[in-house]
Image (spheres, rainbow, N blue to C red):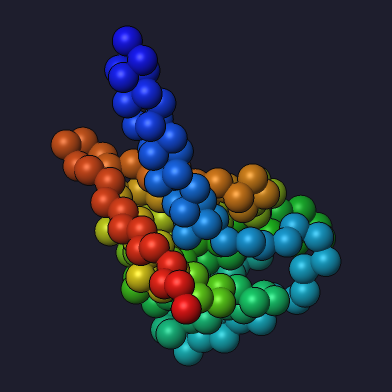
């Protein structure tokens, strides 16, 4: 009885230890207060005040503080008279960089008020040799947590490399 209980406890603790690095890899630390201005550059800009959108296309790059988003196309959707950002949609060769953390995929949607990013199209989040990939990766920035789904019949794949001791 004790042997079975010990094995179960060890298995449970091992599983929890595996999940800890996932939160470190997949949830970038983005402060929600004191954010600086957003700097956007691209080959082309199309503004549509009626549709409340700004579409940056051709090598689009947006930077705020230490986070940079690259994509073939960045669509900013805003609301109200003050043009508050509702969401940002990055499409085509998406790459989000913060320090050593890199997230890639075909599409990323940043839900501004919810502080949530949804990556699709073979998404992968890596930090050095550690990575996680699946069909969809959702990053909850305020909670520093993430959810990775493998999709119908798909699986989640993750690699965690132990730190090398000096």
Relative depth, front residue between 96 and 15: 15
Q: Quadrant of residue 3?
A: top left
User: Residue placed farthest to the top in the image?
Assistant: 1
Can residue 65 be spotted in the picture? yes
Relative depth, front residue between 129 and 149: 129
Question: What residue is at 49 percent from the left and 70 percent from the top?
Answer: 101
From this view, report whether residue 66 is shown above or below residue 5. Answer: below
Image coordinates for residue 157, horizontal then vertical, percent: 26, 51
Can residue 123 be spotted in the picture? no
Relative depth, front residue between 132 and 129: 129
Q: Quadrant of the N terminus?
A: top left
User: Residue placed farthest to the front in the image?
Assistant: 2
From this view, report whether residue 22 is shown above or below residue 2. Answer: below
Q: Is residue 117 rendered to the left or right of residue 115?
A: left
Question: What residue is at 56 percent from the left and 73 percent from the top?
Answer: 98
Q: How many labels does the image show?
A: 0
Image coordinates for residue 10, horizontal then vertical, percent: 38, 32
Q: In which quarter of the image is residue 95?
A: bottom left
């Amino acid at each position: 009885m004790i042997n079975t209980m010990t094995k179960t406890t060890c298995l449970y603790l091992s599983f929890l230890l595996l999940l800890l690095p996932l939160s470190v890899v997949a949830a970038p630390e983005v402060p929600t207060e004191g954010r600086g201005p957003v700097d956007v550059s691209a080959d082309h800009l199309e503004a549509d005040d009626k549709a409340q959108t700004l579409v940056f296309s051709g090598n689009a790059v947006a930077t705020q503080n230490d986070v940079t988003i690259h994509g073939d196309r960045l669509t900013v959707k805003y609301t109200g008279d003050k043009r508050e950002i509702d969401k940002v949609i990055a499409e085509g060769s998406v790459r989000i960089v913060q320090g050593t953390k890199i997230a890639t995929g075909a599409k990323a949607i940043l839900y501004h008020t919810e502080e949530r990013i949804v990556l699709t199209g073979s998404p992968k989040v890596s930090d050095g040799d550690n990575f996680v990939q699946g069909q969809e990766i959702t990053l909850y920035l305020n909670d520093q947590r993430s959810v990775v789904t493998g999709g119908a019949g798909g699986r989640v794949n993750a690699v965690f490399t132990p730190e090398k001791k000096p």
